[in-house]
Image (cartoon, helix red, strand yellow):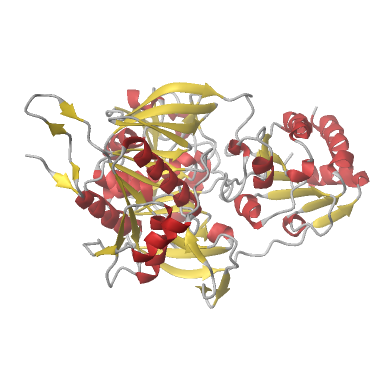
Amino acid sequence: MIMLKNGVPVGGLSHPLGWMVKTMPNIAVLVKRVPDTIAKITVVDGSIDLSGVKWIISPYDEYAIESALQHREANGGSVTAITLGNADCDKTLKDAKALGCDELVRLWQDGWESLDSNGVQSILAGAISDLGSEIVYCGKAAADTDAGSTGPGVAEKLGWASISNVVSVSFEDSGVEALVPVAGGQAKVGINFPCLLTIDKGPNEPRRPNVRGIMMARKAEVNLKGGQAPAATISVISKSTPPAKPPGKTYHGAENVPAVVQALRDEANVI
Amino acid sequence: MSNVIIAETKDGTIHPGTAELVTAAGALGGGITIVVPAGDDSPAAAAAEISGVERVIALVGDCFATYDASSWASAIDSVSPAGNLLLSASADGKDLGARLAARRSISVVQNVIAIEDGNVTYPIYSGKAHETAALSGDAVITVRANTFAPAPGGGQADIGIVNQSADVATAVREMLAKASERLDVAEANIIISGGRGMGSPDNFSQLEEIADVLGAAVGASRAAVDTWEEIPHSMQVGQTGKTVNPSLYIAVGISGAIQHLAGMRTSKYIVAINKDPEAPIFKHADYGIVATWEEVLPTLKSELQSLLS
C-alpha cells in the first residue's frame, strides 16, 4: 500500500517490478515572528512595550527558508512553513509563502500564551509528525531570545538526528551533506533522513519576494491546528533594562595609548 | 536538589569554564556532580579538583570523538542523575542542553548570566533587555562564559568511570582546515576586531600582529564582512555573526551599529579606537581612544610587546 501525505509518497514507492521510484522530499521549515532587530526595546514596569514595533521573520529563519526552497528546487517535493503563535503570525507565514513556500501551518490555541521550551517543542514535533516530513529546516536561533533550543529540542522529541549551525547544504537522495563550523575550520557532515538542520548565515543570501509571490501570498490559506502541550515548569517573573555601564574614559589622540595599555593592566587586570 | 554539570573537553583537558559552572550550580544550591564525556577518562581528574564538587563521572565512549547531537544526548542522559543540568552556553553546549531538556521533558534556559534566589536571568532582544524566570522543577541551564567567577581548586571528588556509547547518526566526510591557525572569536578570551574603518582587508594584518602579541582572536564587524570577501563570515561578531563574551574586546574602526553591539556588549572590558568622536561605540567603551587606527595600532603593538614580553 502506498501512503500519501500531502500528495507525497511516504517512505519510498516499491514497484511490483522491483525498481524503486525516487520519492520527492516532504520538507518543513519552522519560522518565528520577531520584532525587527533594529527596533528600540523599552522596558516599562517590568514588561516590554512592543507597540509600534515592526515585526519580521527572524533573520536566521530566512536562511532556513532559502535552504528549504533550494532543496525543493534540487529534488522536487513541497515546502511547508510552520509557525507557533496567534493570528498576528499569519502575516509571517504569508511572507514565507511570498518567498515560495507551498503550504502554511499555524499552531495555536487558547492557553498557549506562556509555553516553555518543552511545550513549544512538543507542539512543533507533533505537527511535523502529522505532516510526515522527512527533513526540517529552522534558523539557528530566534532573534528575540537567541536561545537556539527549538531545533535540537524538536529533533530530540522526534527521535531524529540533527546538525546545528549549518552554513550550506548539498542535497542527496537519502539525506543531505551539511557544511558546519568546527574547531580548526569547517567540516562536511553527512546525515540521512529524517533529520533536522538549524541554519546559520552562509554564502546563500535569502531571496526576496517577487510580485507574483506577493500576489500568491495574499490568497494563501493558513491551516490552523491545535494540540496537546505539557505545562510549563518555568515562569517569567520580570523583565528589566540591563544595568547601565559606568561611563568609560575617552582619550583624545594616539599619544594616550600607553595610558590605556597601563589601565588595562592595572585597573582592568585583563592583560 | 542536585545539580549535574556536563563538562566540555578539548585536547584531553576540561574546558576552564567548568569551574564557572560549579559556581553557577552553587548559586542554585544542592549537590554538584560533574559528568565528563570524552574518549577516555583522563580529563576527569581535573574536574575532581574543583572545590565544591561531590562526584565526577568519567563518561567514556567512542561516540565522544566528535560532537554528534543525538548520540551524546542519549549517552549523557543515561548516566546523569536527576536534577538541574548545567552546561556552558557554547554552540555545542546550547545544542546538547536543548536536546537533554527535550529528552527529559523539562525546560531549558539558555545564556544565563545571573542566578539569585533560585531565579535565572538571561538577555533577550540581543541584550537590549534582561528577563528573569522562576524555575519550578529541574531545568537545563546553559551559562554564558565569564559571568560567574571560577570555583577555586583544592577539591578531591571521587571519580567513577562509566563506559557508555551510542550510535552516531552523522558522519564527518571531510575536514576543511581554516586558512590560519588563529583562535576562533567564539573561544577567545581577548578579541581585536576591525570594521570598515580599516579601509581595506589588507590592513587587518595589523590587527593580526597585535592579536599575536595578546594571544587574541581577530574579529570583524558585519560591514567589514559584507564589504570584503577576504574577511570570512566566521570572523563576524554581532547579531548575524557570533555572540562573544571575552574579558577584553578591542574595536578598531567600528562605529558600533546595534547589530554589532548585540554580539559584544557584555564583554568585560571594551576598548574603542575610532577617529569619529561621535561614534556610538564610545558609549559602550570602558576606554575610548579618538584617533585614526593608523596612528594608534603601531604604538599599541609596541606598548603591548614591551609589557608582555
Q: Quadrant of the N terminus of chain B?
A: bottom left
Residue A213 position, x and y percent, is 42, 56
The answer, for residue A18, to whether it is visible in the render is: yes
Residue A12 shown left or right of residue A265 in the figure: left
| Rendered image quadrant of residue B197 | top right
Residue A13 shown left or right of residue B287 in the figure: left
| Residue found 66% across the figure and 50% down from its top | B268
Closer-to-camera residue (B75/A47): A47
Residue B15 position, x and y percent, is 51, 34
Q: Is residue B130 above or below residue B293?
A: below
Residue B154 position, x and y percent, is 52, 36
Q: Quadrant of the C terminus of chain B?
A: top right
The count of marks equals 0
| Residue found 40% across the figure and 24% down from its top | B172
| Residue found 71% across the figure and 41% down from its top | B193
Residue B158 position, x and y percent, is 38, 33
Closer-to-camera residue (B243/B117): B243
| Residue found 35% across the figure and 59% down from its top | A83
Closer-to-camera residue (A182/A30): A30
Q: Is residue B270 above or below residue A44?
A: above
The answer, for residue B164, to whether it is visible in the render is: no
Residue A198 shown left or right of residue B211 in the figure: left
Q: Is residue A107 above or below residue B101?
A: below
| Rendered image quadrant of residue A94 | bottom left
Residue B89 shown left or right of residue A19 in the figure: right
- In the orientation shown, which residue stands out farthest toward the front? A212
